[in-house]
Amino acid sequence: MKRHKAIRFFMVITVFIMQITFLLMTLKENYESNNFLIVTSVLLIALTIFFGYRYLDLHHEDHSYEKISVVIWVPIGALICYSLNVYGDLGSVLAAGITGTTASFIPALNKKSDYLKKLPAAIYCGAFVGMSSVEISPSVGFIVTAGVLTGVFFMLSKNLFLGIGGKLGSIAFLGVVVIYLLNWLSI
């Protein structure tokens, strides 16, 4: 039980830190001259996010994780979207749209299969990874690694952030940012 709570805490705190960091960077870039406004804005947003996590019912009480057989579709979705984006020269939005729309038809192959019903979300989560710009994700290896890490986050966050829009994109963003930072630190 303690392990499940530790994993839940790790996921929530990781997303919280990424959100605050992203907001800080955005505010710093747009409001370089007025530091008081930046600090006040970040504090208000951080408090709002903190109290949202703390007091809203965003999570189930049970601790279950997505199966590996579903999670492996996250990097596959990332590769499909990246290939359409870079090699097909379709652009990131169209590539993600095609990937997600195609994935939405997978459950129709066998309407009784619970497994097939879970695949569209995993593939679409991967599509968000594949949308990354070539400047951020320069190679297929980067996309696969970010897709695998995003898959781990997808697996761990099955019962977290329920009813919150943007969960799949946030998880994908988290995976890409962590792999990007690890690459940047290793250079």
Image (spheres, rainbow, N blue to C red):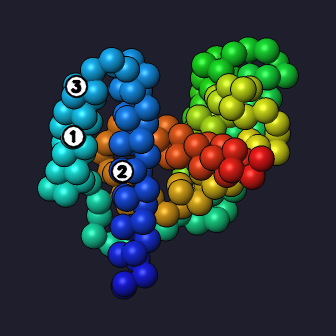
Pinpoint residue 152: horizontal percent, then vertical percent. Answer: 59, 60
Look at the picture and state if 73 lies above or below 108.
below
Quarter of the image where the N terminus is located: bottom left
Dot 3 or dot 1: first in sequence order is 3
Instruction: Give the crowd class for mark 3: few <14, some 14-19, many >=20 residues within 10 Å.
Output: some
Instruction: Give the crowd class for mark 1: few <14, some 14-19, many >=20 residues within 10 Å.
Output: some
Label 3, on which residue?
A: 37
Pinpoint residue 180: horizontal percent, then vertical percent. Answer: 66, 43
- Residue, x 37% and y 84% (percent of image)? 2
Instruction: Decide if residue 176 is on the left or right side of residue 24.
Output: right
Measured in 3D between alpha carbons, the distance from the residue under mark 1 to the one under mark 2, in whole angstroms, is: 13 Å
**Amino acid type, callout 2:** Phe
Q: Nearer the viewer, residue 18 or 30?
A: 30
Label 1, on which residue?
A: 43
Residue 124's label in the rendered image is: none
- Residue, x 37% and y 58% (percent of image)? 12
User: In this rendering, which labeled residue sits more in front, label 3 or label 2?
Assistant: 3
Look at the picture and state if 179 lies above or below 115.
above
Mark 2 falls on what kind of element?
Answer: helix
Label 2, on which residue?
A: 16
